[in-house]
């Protein structure tokens, strides 16, 4: 993803109190999924870790989903001019039900540690424990729950490829998998959705991403109200940075009202592990995954209630 260094701090009043019968998401299970992805090594396009992890992800989705669609596309490396064959992985739950919501995360990792303090590592691929594996880990866990639930609407989980092959200072060179899905969807897409990106930080703090607040203010309010009721302390009650991520092409090119859940300050405003070789499982947290997974699962269940 790409960040614009602007912020708008708007304090919102969020209701407090306990949510009705909150869903017990298992952050430890999600963290195991995060670790397993990292055991494949860097998952940058063209690498052995990329192909091994892709095959593993497809198998995980096939176990839980009603239908799994592999959407191939080609993308050029902006630095080497090499072409890669990439794949969005689309899992559909409730194929016989009306479209409901899209849940997305990118599964590829950056081929270069270009933000590393040591320039020696700038040409080396990163492990991407937070920037890549964390959102995928939560969605794989959610998929195991969706298999057992009988929600009255369809849920589409999409693992985007080609998100992190972009050039610095060129936002639209990022998020290429979501752009491909938006322009050439293999099936009808839901009207709204949530992207999970960099949600495993041990010091997790997620503000309301500004583009998301513009694209889907109702879903933003619904999520943060629910986070308040669930006492999820990671969710901060202000509109923060403007981020170019997978939610932008989906809204721009397909009209899907997307929200991006992201903590760009990894681990905090004074240190940076983003796009460095410190983006490793040891700098991520099962508790952080638990908070985000808990919020998304309770959102899904609350929308499925008839009362």
Image: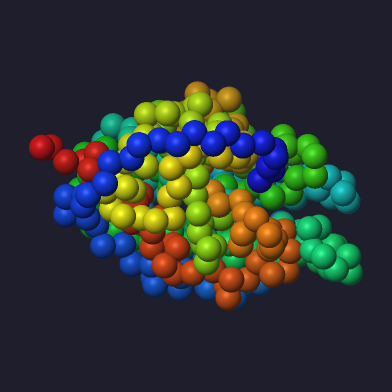
Q: Identify the residue at image location x=61%, y=37%.
A: 7
Left of 41 or right of it: where is 261? left
Residue 44 shows up from this direction: no
- Measured as percent of width and height from the top left, residue 102 is found at 42, 40
Q: Identify the residue at image location x=88%, y=51%.
A: 80
Residue 267, quarter of the rendered image: bottom right
Residue 211 shows up from this direction: yes
Left of 175 or right of it: where is 136? left
- Measured as percent of width and height from the top left, residue 174 is found at 70, 42
In the picture as drawn, the residue positioned furthest to the left comes out as 307
How many marks the image carries: the answer is 0
**The N terminus sits in image quarter:** top right
Instruction: Determine whether 127 is above or below 151 in the image.
Output: below
- Measured as percent of width and height from the top left, residue 167 is found at 80, 44
Viewer-proximal residue among 297 and 282? 282
Viewer-proximal residue among 14 and 145? 14
**The C terminus sits in image quarter:** top left
Left of 191 or right of it: where is 86? right
Viewer-proximal residue among 139 and 2? 2
Residue 240, quarter of the rendered image: top right
Instruction: Determine whether 73 is above or below 84 in the image.
Output: above
Q: Identify the residue at image location x=21%, y=52%.
A: 18
Q: Identify the residue at image location x=69%, y=70%.
A: 278
The chosen color scheme is rainbow
- Measured as percent of width and height from the top left, residue 99 is found at 33, 33
């Amino acid at each position: 993803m790409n960040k614009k260094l602007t912020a708008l701090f708007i304090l919102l009043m969020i209701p407090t109190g306990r949510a009705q019968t909150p869903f017990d998401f298992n952050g430890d299970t999600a963290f195991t999924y995060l670790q397993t992805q990292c055991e494949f090594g860097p998952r940058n396009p063209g690498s052995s870790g990329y192909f091994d992890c892709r095959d593993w992800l497809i198998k995980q989705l096939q176990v839980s989903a009603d239908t799994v669609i592999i959407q191939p596309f080609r993308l050029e490396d902006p630095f080497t001019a090499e072409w890669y064959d990439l794949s969005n992985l689309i899992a559909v739950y409730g194929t016989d039900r009306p479209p409901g919501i899209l849940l997305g995360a990118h599964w590829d990792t950056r081929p270069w540690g270009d933000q590393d303090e040591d320039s020696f590592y700038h040409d080396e691929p990163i492990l991407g424990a937070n920037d890549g594996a964390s959102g995928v880990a939560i969605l794989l866990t959610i998929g195991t729950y969706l298999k057992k639930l009988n929600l009255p609407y369809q849920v589409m989980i999409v693992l985007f490829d080609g998100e992190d092959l972009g050039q610095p200072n060129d936002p639209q060179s990022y998020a290429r998998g979501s752009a491909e899905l938006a322009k050439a969807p293999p099936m009808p897409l839901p009207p709204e959705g949530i992207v999970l990106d960099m949600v495993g930080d041990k010091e997790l703090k997620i503000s309301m991403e500004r583009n998301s607040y513009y694209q889907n203010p109702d879903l933003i309010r619904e999520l943060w109200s629910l986070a308040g009721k669930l006492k999820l302390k990671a969710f901060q009650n202000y509109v923060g940075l403007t981020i170019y991520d997978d939610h932008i092409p989906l809204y721009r090119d397909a009209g899907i009202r997307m929200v991006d859940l992201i903590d760009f300050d990894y681990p905090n405003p004074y240190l940076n592990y983003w796009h460095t070789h410190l983006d490793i499982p040891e700098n991520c947290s099962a508790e952080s995954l638990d908070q985000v997974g808990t919020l998304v699962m309770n959102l899904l269940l609350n929308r499925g209630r008839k009362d």
